[in-house]
Image: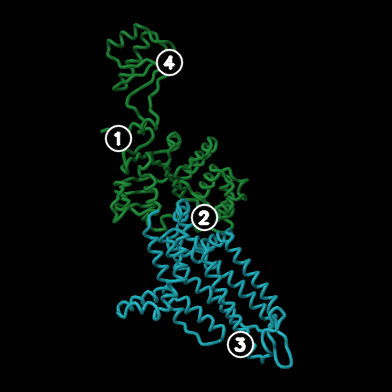
């Protein structure tokens, strides 16, 4: 009940911030664009995929059309993932530092809630807000593809869960950084640093960091750091495979779940030990 | 029943490189506050008042010692189930209305539904904010924020209320209203732990007062005990003193100081006071009143702090 109250307060806080509304507005614009852009037309040779009324593909049999639409959906989901990671982190990174500000944290912690509950409530509130945005976009896209291309494929709906899960993993890192630094800009900078530089370098460690040294201990440390952090790129690739109805590797998801649980736990421990 | 108890509570803040900078904010604080008491903590800036409250609310952890709230260790969230807190410089989200603030923080205390809605409305009326309940907090003045803070602290019908500078920014009428609220809470058996710089306010409502300085407890007692000045009485006179009285009183080594409407006498006992009165009567001087002299809490506080500062 108290956790629910915290989630509700966080949702209200995010709704009051323009950023989350802007995110929803961008989704609406993209969906409108998609609705205007995509359509199919049936000819004697097969079905043609059209973009803005122009023929985008040669006439195809139904199976090929489905593959082409799924590719489009995968591209759209990839774009959504990038958008959510960039804007979503920006919109929600302030949730925890704001709650830990002097004058606000006193009000929360004087209530009969444990510190980890406060952190979890704020974390879940941000994740739920992002999920609402993602599901809005994905449902919209599903309806548009269904109505205009006659493909009612539930796989795209699953991508809402996958994208939110990836955001939740990354947001656990943001939460940890927010508790440690209590500073929104620093948390954002550090997480973007991880996203754009550290994450990529670690994922391609065999072609980059491994070249620094052949020492097995060094490489083990590099591997350890890689597995300690959520594997966003690997999850994104697998998310695309899911949309393309290809076989998925669940290991990055399991590893990222454990990693984010560890980051959240670390944040809770730091918060528990902190004096306000 | 003991509502709040601390046992040799100490807090050292450590900062700087390798924790080289240490500040002892609280030193062996042992206190107990009975249920239904209005207990005030006084002290100059940096005395450790806020640290004590923060430890009691588990916002800060003690370095040594122990503390309980309503029988529970302060580190347990259960200890705060029936506790209300009005912090100093509290910040409510500006996008919420007064009603939403009370409902949100009430829900965090485990209250919900119709009960929470009716309690929020009742509390807004109690603190004189009924008409402002639907207005966003960002439009509130400092005094209104303080009133809302008080309502928020009471939203879960707490048994113990911690108030840090509750009348800060409130006008005199509002202060009197807050005092009435506190007295009403006391009659309903609530315990109030007050931290205020306004000593005249503290004097008006407190049952007992503790004075802290540099983290140490200097004195604790009732307002009467802290403001008593020994056996000093003010004797109000309808007439002025006569020369004959002055001569005889000097001869009998009676210690007194003349004032415009009477005299102040220092005596060792009640019979000695009666001897002064007898002498006045014998000289035909009309007595209008006899009252025991008291200092204000502020005077007692300042004298105690100065004594500590003096080498």
Tell me the CA gap for discs 4 and 3: 105 Å
Where in the figure is residue B227, as x and y percent of width and height?
A: 37, 31
Point out the frontmost of discs 1 and 3.
3
Chain at numbered mark 4? B
Point out the frontmost of discs 4 and 1.
1
The residue at which mark 1 appears reads as B309
Q: Is residue A58 above or below residue B27?
A: below
Could you say which disc has been placed on residue A67 in the image?
Answer: 3
Tell me the CA gap for discs 4 and 2: 56 Å
Q: Residue at x 74, y 90 (%)?
A: A43
Q: Residue at x 50, y 60 (%)?
A: A94
Q: Is residue B82 above or below residue A257?
A: above
Near mark 1 (Cα within 10 A), the count class, few <14, some 14-19 or many ≥20, is: few
Tell me the CA gap for discs 1 and 3: 84 Å
Q: Colour of chain A?
A: cyan
The residue at which mark 2 appears reads as B105
- Residue at far bottom of view: A45
Viewer can see residue B2: no
Point out the frontmost of discs 1 and 2.
1
Point out the frontmost of discs 4 and 3.
3
Q: Earlier in the sequence, mark 1 or mark 2?
A: 2
Chain at numbered mark 1? B
- Contact? badges 4 and 1 (CB < 8 Å): no
- Residue at far left of view: B311
Where in the figure is residue B137, as x and y percent of width and height?
A: 57, 49
Q: Nearer the viewer, residue A250 or B37?
A: A250
Near mark 3 (Cα within 10 A), the count class, few <14, some 14-19 or many ≥20, is: some
The residue at which mark 4 appears reads as B261
Q: Colour of chain B?
A: green
Point out the frontmost of discs 4 and 2.
2
Chain at numbered mark 2? B
Near mark 4 (Cα within 10 A), the count class, few <14, some 14-19 or many ≥20, is: some
């Amino acid at each position: 009940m108290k956790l629910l109250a915290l989630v509700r307060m966080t949702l209200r806080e995010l709704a009051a911030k323009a950023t989350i509304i802007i995110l929803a507005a961008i989704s609406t614009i993209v969906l409108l664009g998609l609705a205007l852009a995509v359509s199919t037309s049936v000819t004697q040779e097969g079905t043609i995929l059209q973009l803005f009324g122009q023929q985008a593909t040669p006439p195809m049999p139904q199976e090929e059309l489905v593959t082409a639409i799924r590719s489009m959906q995968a591209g759209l989901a990839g774009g959504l993932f990038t958008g959510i990671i960039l804007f979503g982190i920006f919109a929600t990174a302030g949730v925890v530092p704001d709650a830990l500000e002097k004058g606000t944290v006193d009000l929360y912690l004087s209530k009969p809630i444990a510190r980890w509950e406060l952190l979890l409530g704020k974390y879940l509130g941000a994740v739920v807000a992002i999920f609402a945005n993602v599901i809005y976009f994905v449902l919209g896209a599903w309806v548009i593809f269904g109505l205009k291309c006659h493909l009612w494929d539930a796989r795209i709906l699953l991508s809402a869960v996958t994208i939110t899960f990836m955001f939740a993993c990354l947001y656990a890192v943001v939460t940890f950084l927010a508790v440690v630094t209590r500073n929104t800009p620093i948390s954002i900078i550090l997480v973007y640093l991880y996203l754009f530089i550290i994450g990529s370098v670690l994922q391609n460690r065999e072609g980059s960091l491994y070249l620094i040294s052949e020492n097995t201990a060094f490489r083990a440390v590099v591997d350890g750091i890689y597995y300690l952090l959520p594997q966003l790129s690997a999850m994104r690739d697998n998310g695309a495979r899911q949309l393309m109805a290809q076989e998925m590797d669940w290991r990055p998801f399991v590893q990222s779940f454990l990693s984010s649980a560890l980051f959240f736990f670390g944040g809770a421990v730091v918060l528990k030990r902190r004096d306000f | 029943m003991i509502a709040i108890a601390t046992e040799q509570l100490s807090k050292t803040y450590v900062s700087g490189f390798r924790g080289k900078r240490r500040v002892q904010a609280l030193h062996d604080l042992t206190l107990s506050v009975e249920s239904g008491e209005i207990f005030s903590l006084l002290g100059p800036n940096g005395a450790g008042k806020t640290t004590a409250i923060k430890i009691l609310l588990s916002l800060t952890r003690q370095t040594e010692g122990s503390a309980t709230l309503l029988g529970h260790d302060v580190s347990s969230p259960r200890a705060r189930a029936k506790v209300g807190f009005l912090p100093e410089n509290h910040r409510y989200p500006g996008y919420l209305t007064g009603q939403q603030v009370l409902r949100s923080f009430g829900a965090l205390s485990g209250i919900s539904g119709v009960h929470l809605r009716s309690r929020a409305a009742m509390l807004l009326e109690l603190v004189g904010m009924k008409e402002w309940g639907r207005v966003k907090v960002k439009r509130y003045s400092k005094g209104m924020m303080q009133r809302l803070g008080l309502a928020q602290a009471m939203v879960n019908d707490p048994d113990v209320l911690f108030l840090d500078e509750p009348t800060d920014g409130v006008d005199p009428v509002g202060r009197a209203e807050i005092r009435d609220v506190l007295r009403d809470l006391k009659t309903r058996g609530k315990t109030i732990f007050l931290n205020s710089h306004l000593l005249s306010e503290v004097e008006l409502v407190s049952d007992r007062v503790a004075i802290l300085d540099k983290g140490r407890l200097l004195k604790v007692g009732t307002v009467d005990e802290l403001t008593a000045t020994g056996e000093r009485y003010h004797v109000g006179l309808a007439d002025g003193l006569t020369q004959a009285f002055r001569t005889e009183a000097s001869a009998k080594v009676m210690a007194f100081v003349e004032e415009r409407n009477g005299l102040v006498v220092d005596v060792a006992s009640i019979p000695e006071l009666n001897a002064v009165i007898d002498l006045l009567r014998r000289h035909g001087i009309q007595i209008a009143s006899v009252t025991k002299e008291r200092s204000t809490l502020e005077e007692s506080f300042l004298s105690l702090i100065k004594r500590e500062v003096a080498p």
